[in-house]
Image (tube, coloured by chain):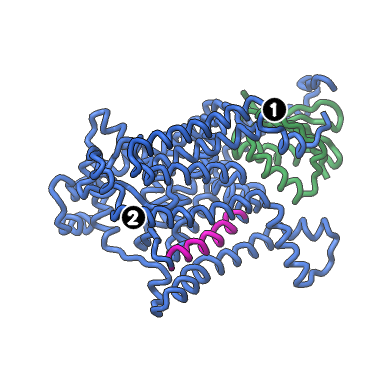
Chain colours: A green, B blue
Amino acid sequence: MAIKFDKVSDGHYQLDVCGYVCPYPQMYTKKALQKLGSDDELMLIFDNPSSGESITAMCETEGNDIFEREESEGSSTWMIRKG
Amino acid sequence: MATDSAQVMKSPGLLAHKGGYKAIALVALVMILSLGLLDNDMRWIYLLVYLWFGLVYGMLLQYGRFCMASAIRDLFAIKVPRMAVGVMIATALFSITAGLVTVSGYSTFYPHPLGWHIIVGGLIFGFGMIFTGGCASGSLYKTGEGNMGSMLVLLSISFSMALFVDLGSWSNSLAPASWIESALAKDMPESLSVGNGWFDIFTAGYVWNLSGGTMADTIGTGNVWIDVFAGNVLIVAILPTLAILVVLYMSTYRKGYIRRNKLESLSLSDELRGIWGMIITSRNTAIAGLGLGVFAGLQMWATGALREHYEIFNFGELLMKMGYTEGLSIQETVFDPGYWYITTQEAQLGGWVLDKAGIDVMDNIFFGLMNGIPNPLINAPLLMSFGIIVGAAILALSRREFKWKVPNMETAIFALVGGALMGIGARLGMGCNVGAFFAAVTNGDLTGWIFLVGMLGGGLLGVKAFNMWLNRGSVDDEFDIYLADPAKNRLIKNE
């Protein structure tokens, strides 16, 4: 289990923080989003429900758009477009 | 994969997935256990009230992801006020229900003595909880979500407290001579050896010399409604929470609010709409806060009414009448706060285990004189904590959010070390984010705000230390290299 932050293609990145609990997911998401350019997309995979609420609020404040959310048994995959 | 989270998360239908059946099974189990106990002796209702309120707290905590560690950490680390707003709403509402209970004469609350220990305790507790990822109540509900790391936090809190209050004679030299002198002058039973062990000396030689009180006592007009609602509710709880909400809005939410709405100059009504928007953003947490406020008040009332019914001051007396004498303190009492509390009962669990392992923990004030170490199965407040775990598990299962999560080595070490700091901080500060802060400020006791100041300071230091850890050389490099090096790119399946 490790934090995985990969570039998938130009403008497309993936951050996998499964297995990590507060505060890692939201802090790494913030770090990752800082590295992205405007309109770049981040696929975020995490399994700590409470981090989701913080990430939603963080994206709302900073103007990033969470445009897809898929929730499966215990884990979430979100697509975030940097504003 | 384009699915709306609202559809998937909120309406899976309880029976449409395995988790739903497990949630129903847990509810059934609690009902059977409750009926079995009541069939054995109706007086177990006193213990079951704790368990049932624990279940409700657990569901509310999980629903609102209600956690003081998140509140402080998200605020400092990622400038998100969501949880802090929820906590403030819960505080304001609980103060009103607590006020009603106090006026009705059923309040079980005792104010905490005022002294430096509160802020120091808050500081250590706040620093520790940043590393564990959950406060005392947050770790309970996260355990209910299947988070084994949080379970480690609970174990660490329990044993660190039990060991801390039972420090041996080697620790005497750490206490000022005046404390030892004052402790020995207290004329306590020989068996407690109050001049021996740092925590005993601290309790008898320092804390007992302090005094405390509620704002209602300070005002003391003689009209209980005015004393309680002007003093406890308005001055100690509502005005400070409103002030904090305004500060949170100005320092975090306002910037995004102006940008989103393309506002140039803000009128007062724009500002008020903004504050309301901030509260609405924290909707789930605010709803949880509302529920916690109402139920925390109801619990005080229910326990107060049961005490009157059974003509007791403490559950220990009821246990005696029912024939259970093991683990009671020398005053024949057990820990029985009658309101929402987290840490002392966890210390009792640690103490009980140590006692079974052959370590005498009843020779100190904390267990021996005050709280006892009852069998965990009949420890009413501990069943409340257990109820929080089960309640959170029931809701997490039914919302398809339950997942067993095993911590890695880093998280496990942080859980143990942070949990130990939380335990020590909680005993110094006379409680955790619930007992020393939430239950205190809502009952007119200003020491709660002092604990919060300590917790904020500790939280700020904790976030700084945690950021240093995250940004330490290798990890940050790796974060960059992954981006810059196309050879490390990976393809995502189905895309």
Q: Quadrant of residue B171?
A: top left
Badge 2 amino acid: His
Q: Which residues are magenta?
A: B86-103
- Seen in the image, is B331 located left or right of residue A25? left
- Name the residue beneath numbered marker 1: B16
Q: Quadrant of the N terminus of chain B?
A: top right
The mark that comes first in sequence, 2 or 1, is: 1
Query: Closest to the observer: B399 or B240?
Result: B399
Q: Position of residue B52 (x, y in %)?
A: 47, 43
Query: Closest to the observer: B468 or B80?
Result: B80
Label 1 chain ID: B
Please determine whether, in this image, residue B431 is positioned above or below residue B27.
Answer: below
Badge 1 amino acid: Ala
Query: Residue lying farthest bottom?
Result: B221
In the structure shown, which secondary structural element does the residue marked by tag 2 occupy? helix
Q: Position of residue B495 (x, y in %)?
A: 85, 22
- Name the residue beneath numbered marker 2: B309
Q: Residue at x 33, y 44 (%)?
A: B43
**How far apart in space, not on screen, are marks 2 and 1 (Cα)?**
44 Å
- Seen in the image, is B108 located left or right of residue B473? left
